Structures are given as structure tokens and as C-alpha cells.
């Protein structure tokens, strides 16, 4: 791992406790971003969804309820403290269709075409190699699946890609 990347991850490791402490406020504040992602990626009941850079648990926790017991949500984040807080929150909510994996968006440990949809809320700005990360997201979704990232910038921006073989 290059030093620049380690620095970013160390900063998130330190801030994880604050994302946990203020989770209710953050959940409320960023709810419109989650709604935008869900809408853009056409997420619905029974789908298998990947969250890249899930932090303290969103949008994973919300999406796990939307896909329901016939679907699943796979949460990922490269920072151990973020994974721990998200996992604890899912446990306290009794969610059973959510799985956790500590990994970076640049190197997803999943087979090709595992998911219907991949999303990331406010995480793509931290990809060290954004092109590789977008390629990875496209690799793990099924034909006609969607990849949607919401990122911050001068204006809120939702980037959405659809994988089509045609
Ligand atoms: C601003 S937080 C957003 C967390 C959460 N998705 C939310 O909206 O509340 C950014 C997250 O990106 C994660 N992150 C940093 N580098 C990453 C990478 N290379 N791949 C995936 N996620 C990364 C951080 O660990 C952190 O949890």
C-alpha cells in the first residue's frame, strides 16, 4: 500500500468513533443521498447489492431493509473500525441479510458478476485509483446491473453507470 493511501485509511480509523457517535444525525442528514442512490440504481426487493465504503453503515443498513429477506446486502470498507461499528449496528437492529467484508474499492474480493447493483455513498472521492475502482465495481455486477456513486464536490453529484453487454 502506498503511504498516501495508508494516511487516508488511518484518518478514517481515527474518525470511525465519531461517525458512530453521530450516526442518527448523519443518517438523517444524508437520507436524501441514499434515496438518490436507491432510485438511480433501481434497487428493489430481492436484489443482491454491494456497498463500497459503507463507513458506519449507510447506505447498507437502509438498503438491507429495501431488498428484504429474499435479497442481500454486502457491506465493504477498508477500515477495521468502520467495519466493527457497522457490524455492531446491524446486529443491534437484528438484520440478517447483511454481510461484511473489510476491503478496498480498488480490490474487491468477489467473483465476476456477483451482484445486481453496486453503490457507494460519499466514498468514491477516497479511491486512490478511481479508474481501477470503477472497473472493479463494473466487474462484480451482473449484465444490465447498475453502479451508482454519490460524491461531494461543488455540487452534489450522482454518477451512475449501467453495465450492458450490447
Ligand atoms: C465520508 S465516509 C462515508 C461512509 C458512508 N458511506 C456514509 O455515507 O456514511 C468515507 C468512507 O470511505 C471509506 N474509504 C476510504 N478509502 C476507501 C477505498 N479505497 N475504498 C473504499 N472505501 C474507502 C472510508 O473508510 C470511509 O468509511
Image (cartoon, helix red, strand yellow):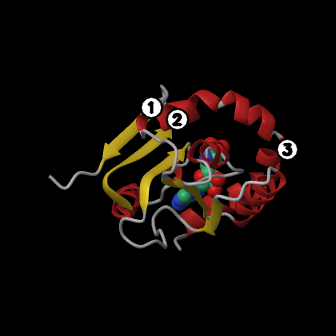
Quarter residue 113 falls in: bottom left
Say which label, 3 or 2, has the lower sequence index. 3
Q: Horizontal and vertical percent for residue 75? A: 60, 58
Disc 3 + disc 2, Cβ < 8 Å = no
Say which label, 2 or 1, has the lower sequence index. 2
* Residue that carries the numbered disc 1 in the rendered image: 157
Q: Residues within 10 Å of mark 1 (few under 14, many from 20)?
A: some
Say which label, 3 or 1, has the lower sequence index. 3
* Residue that carries the numbered disc 3 in the rendered image: 21
Please, what secondary structure does the residue beneath circle 2 have? loop
Instruction: Check residue 68 in the rendering and tell me which mark sits there, or answer none.
Output: none
Q: Residues within 10 Å of mark 2 (few under 14, many from 20)?
A: some
For residue 98, side relative to residue 130 (left or right): right
Disc 2 + disc 1, Cβ < 8 Å = yes
Viewer-proximal residue among 44 and 55: 44
- As drawn, 113 above or below 31: below
Please, what secondary structure does the residue beneath circle 1 have? strand
Quarter residue 4 falls in: bottom right
Amino acid at each position: 500500500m502506498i503511504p498516501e493511501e495508508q494516511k487516508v485509511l488511518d484518518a478514517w480509523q481515527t474518525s470511525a468513533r465519531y461517525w458512530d457517535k453521530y450516526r442518527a444525525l448523519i443518517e438523517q442528514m444524508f437520507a436524501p443521498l441514499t434515496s438518490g442512490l436507491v432510485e438511480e440504481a433501481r434497487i428493489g426487493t430481492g436484489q443482491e447489492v454491494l456497498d463500497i465504503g459503507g463507513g458506519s453503515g449507510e447506505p447498507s443498513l437502509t438498503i438491507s431493509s429495501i431488498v428484504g429477506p429474499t435479497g442481500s446486502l454486502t457491506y465493504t470498507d477498508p477500515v477495521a473500525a468502520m467495519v466493527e461499528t457497522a457490524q455492531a449496528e446491524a446486529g443491534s437492529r437484528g438484520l440478517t441479510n447483511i454481510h461484511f467484508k473489510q476491503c478496498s474499492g480498488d480490490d474487491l474480493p468477489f467473483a465476476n458478476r456477483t451482484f445486481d447493483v453496486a453503490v457507494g455513498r460519499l466514498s468514491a472521492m477516497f479511491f486512490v485509483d478511481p479508474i481501477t475502482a470503477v472497473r472493479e465495481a463494473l466487474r462484480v455486477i451482473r449484465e444490465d446491473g447498475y453502479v451508482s456513486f454519490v460524491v461531494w464536490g461543488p455540487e452534489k453529484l450522482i454518477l451512475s453507470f449501467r453495465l450492458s453487454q450490447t
